[in-house]
Image (spheres, rainbow, N blue to C red):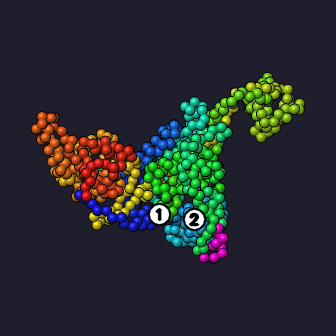
């Protein structure tokens, strides 16, 4: 049973490819609808993948909903068109598409530019410039090699449309972000928060984007899971508890440094003509959250707070902190709703991949929904002391407005109210002019009941601002697996294993009977039942030799394996015999099993009776395997 482990040099280059193969073979993820040829951008999480994803989501919920005291909701994934008219997605949620004139394949024009030129952020370039770059660099169709110069680059809206109910009278869309499901419910959610800012609402759920070129397995798909927090604040009065994260060390790549890098790169390339010159400028900053705020590197203390919380959380779920950073969006890269955004990025096979975005959405979303709907998207801000203010009011003479304006009389009242608030001087003359449906109307000022009055006000209605940490779950699952991927040699054989964190590992313990033997199998099954009762995820495996069973669990990333052997049965019998001889009730406490740790392959014999408690403590991180007292096996 014992194993000898030697380290082998890791080659990171092709981990992605190996991982995708392992993921399919071991039930992590695979392209869906394979029986019908599969379709790009849709993946099924198999038994291991669904469990890992569930564990990641639970860990996210514990941290960002429960521990932060935020509310969680679960909104529909299809929403009616007016929601997306208001949110700006109908007009502005586009990617750049270029179609090959020969094979007809559609591609993301900005990706073709980024993949084949020194441009790193082609998404922020205007379309004519992208067309110029395609022509200048003579870029070709990745599918068939035909030149794309002269092809029109067009915008393509990423939302999946549908019809709600029969016919096409009520168009709807599959939500492109879970966030809108939170924003549209704000008028009710603020009531649950007792109208007190700040408060946060989370949602974990599916989002849909009709990506032009889905790629890199579950990194860019057309249906994926987001875990989003919309945190509503009063921008004038609310401040985060930065002391809770001030000492968190972070690696930051601010926009200013990226711009410096691009400028230096271009200058070097121009100077050398071969693009090979080392370049200067553009450095990541290693600092703490506290210092980054103090020095103005991160403008919003709220964004900084969530970067600090997220950094700790990513570390806890198994993202390698040596391959993790926060990068600020360049101005042209920001989404239509964001005034500032930092991405959490993980390094995979030499590329930085966006794992999450932390945006300052200001009052963009709530203002838009307020303007497009009938509901109130404000919260009452109480003043410390009541304030006496002058208010311009109107009290129009309806016996005049009615006959004069008929059905438009109420609209005239609204216009007069707005005008009084906006421009008191408009009421200084004998007549007041208002605009109604593009037409000017004059009416005598005396009929408006205009007055300026002193009023005592306890507070005012404000539109809250939103800070949004938005996590992609699928990309995180991929990153956790990628960063956990290991190769070494055990007993002279190559081994692949996933060094998954116990908190997220889909299976925590594998239990094996040493051989096909009724008594060994019955004892192993009893152990499985006890471990499951302790809340652990357990798999039972009796097929193939023990070495093969260990390798299977190593590849799945199962942290511990338990083997029941003849020593277990003998120890149990000896205990029972001695208990019977001494007149005690027969017990089985003395029986031990071999417990093997995945990463070191170290083995110890531990008492069966204590296994559930030991395993639960190992999973909770309250025990370390090397500190256990059991007899070491070599
Ligand atoms: N509500 C803000 C929002 O949706 P985003 O940057 O577009 O922001 C947030 O998306 C996260 O969702 C990304 O950081 C990424 O992890 C994930 N994501 C976005 N598009 C994706 C796709 N096509 N496939 C998989 N994950 C995606």
Q: Is residue 514 above or below residue 421?
A: below
Magenta region's main secondary structure? helix
Q: Which is nearer the eye, 106 or 17?
A: 17
Look at the numbered disc 1 and give the secondary structure of its residue.
Answer: loop
Q: Residue placed at 62% from the left, 40% from the top?
A: 239
Q: Name the quarter where the N terminus is drawn.
A: bottom left
Q: Position of residue 203 (x, y in %)?
A: 50, 42
Q: Is residue 304 left or right of residue 449?
A: left
Label 2 or label 1, whichever lies nearer to me, is: 1
Q: Which is nearer the eye, 78 or 281?
A: 281
Q: Which is nearer the eye, 292 or 472?
A: 292
Which residue is the site of mark 1? Answer: 349
Q: Which is nearer the eye, 196 or 137?
A: 196
Q: Name the quarter where the C terminus is drawn.
A: bottom left
Q: Position of residue 74 (x, y in %)?
A: 49, 39
Q: Is residue 600 left or right of residue 165?
A: left
Look at the numbered disc 2 and give the secondary structure of its residue.
Answer: helix
Q: Residue placed at 49% from the left, 58% from the top?
A: 322
Mark 1 packing: few (<14 Cα in 10 Å), some, or many (20+)? some
- Displayed quadrant of residue 218: bottom left
Q: Residue placed at 58% from the left, 74% from the top?
A: 276
Q: Position of residue 207 (x, y in %)?
A: 50, 48
Residue 475 is inside the magenta segment? no
Which residue is the site of mark 2? Answer: 114
Q: Residue placed at 62% from the left, 61% from the top?
A: 258
Q: Is residue 113 above or below residue 424?
A: below
Q: What's the mark number on residue 238?
A: none
Q: Is residue 21 visible?
A: no
Q: Residue furthest left?
A: 581
Q: Is residue 616 visible?
A: yes
Which residues lie in the magenta part? Answer: 264-275
Mark 2 packing: few (<14 Cα in 10 Å), some, or many (20+)? some
């Amino acid at each position: 049973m014992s194993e000898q482990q030697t380290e082998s040099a890791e080659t990171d280059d092709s981990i992605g490819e190996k991982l995708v193969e392992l993921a399919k073979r071991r039930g992590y993820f695979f392209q869906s609808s394979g029986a019908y040829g599969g379709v790009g951008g849709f993946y099924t999480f198999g038994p291991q993948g669904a469990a890992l994803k569930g564990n990641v989501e639970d860990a996210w919920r514990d941290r960002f909903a429960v521990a932060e005291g935020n509310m969680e909701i679960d909104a529909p994934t299809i929403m009616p068109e007016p929601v997306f008219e208001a949110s700006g997605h109908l007009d502005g949620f586009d990617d750049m598409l270029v179609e090959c004139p020969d094979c007809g394949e559609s591609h993301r024009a900005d990706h073709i530019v980024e993949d084949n030129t020194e441009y790193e952020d082609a998404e922020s370039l205007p379309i004519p410039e992208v067309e110029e770059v395609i022509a200048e660099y003579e870029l070709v169709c990745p599918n068939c090699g035909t030149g794309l110069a002269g092809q029109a680059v067009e915008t393509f809206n990423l939302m999946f449309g549908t019809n709600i109910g029969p016919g096409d009278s009520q168009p709807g869309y599959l939500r492109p972000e879970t966030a809108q499901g939170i924003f549209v419910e704000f008028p009710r959610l603020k009531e649950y928060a007792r109208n007190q800012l700040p408060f946060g609402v989370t949602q974990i759920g599916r989002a849909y984007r009709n990506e032009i070129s889905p790629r890199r397995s579950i990194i860019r798909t057309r249906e994926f899971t987001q875990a989003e927090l919309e945190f509503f604040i009063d921008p004038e009065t609310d401040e985060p508890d930065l002391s809770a994260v001030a000492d968190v060390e972070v690696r930051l790549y601010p926009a200013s440094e990226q711009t410096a890098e691009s400028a230096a790169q271009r200058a070097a390339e121009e100077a050398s003509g071969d693009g090979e010159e080392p370049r200067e400028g553009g450095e990541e900053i290693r600092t703490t959250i506290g210092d980054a705020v103090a020095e103005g590197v991160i403008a919003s203390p709220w964004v900084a707070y969530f970067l600090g919380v997220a950094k700790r959380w990513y570390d806890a779920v198994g993202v390698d902190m040596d391959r993790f950073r926060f990068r600020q969006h360049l101005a042209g890269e920001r989404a239509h709703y964001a005034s500032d955004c930092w991405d959490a990025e993980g390094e995979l096979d030499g590329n930085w991949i966006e794992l999450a975005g932390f945006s300052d959405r200001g009052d963009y979303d709530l203002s838009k929904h307020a303007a497009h709907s009938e509901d109130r998207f404000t919260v009452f801000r109480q003043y410390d002391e009541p304030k006496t203010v002058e208010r311009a009011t109107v009290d129009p003479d309806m016996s005049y407005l009615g006959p004069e304006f008929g059905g438009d009389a109420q609209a005239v009242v609204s216009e007069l109210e707005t005008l009084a608030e906006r421009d008191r001087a408009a009421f200084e003359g004998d007549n007041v002019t208002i605009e109604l449906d593009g037409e000017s109307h004059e009416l005598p000022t005396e009929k408006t009941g205009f007055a300026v009055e002193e009023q005592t006000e306890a507070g005012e209605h404000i539109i809250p601002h939103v800070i949004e940490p938005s996590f992609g779950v699928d990309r995180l699952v991929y990153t956790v697996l990628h960063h956990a991927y290991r190769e070494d040699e055990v007993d002279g054989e190559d081994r692949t294993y996933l060094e998954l964190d116990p908190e997220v590992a889909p299976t925590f313990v594998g239990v094996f009977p040493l051989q096909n033997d009724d008594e060994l199998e019955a004892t192993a099954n009893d152990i499985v039942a006890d471990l499951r009762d302790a809340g652990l995820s357990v798999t039972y495996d009796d097929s193939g030799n023990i070495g093969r069973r260990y390798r299977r669990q190593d590849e799945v990333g199962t942290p511990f394996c338990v083997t029941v052997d003849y020593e277990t049965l003998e120890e149990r019998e000896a205990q029972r015999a001695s208990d019977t001889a001494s007149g005690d009730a027969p017990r089985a406490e003395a029986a031990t099993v071999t417990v093997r740790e995945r990463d070191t392959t170290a083995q110890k014999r531990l008492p069966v009776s204590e296994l559930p408690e030991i395993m639960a403590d190992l999973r909770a991180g309250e025990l370390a395997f090397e500190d256990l007292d059991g007899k070491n096996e070599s």
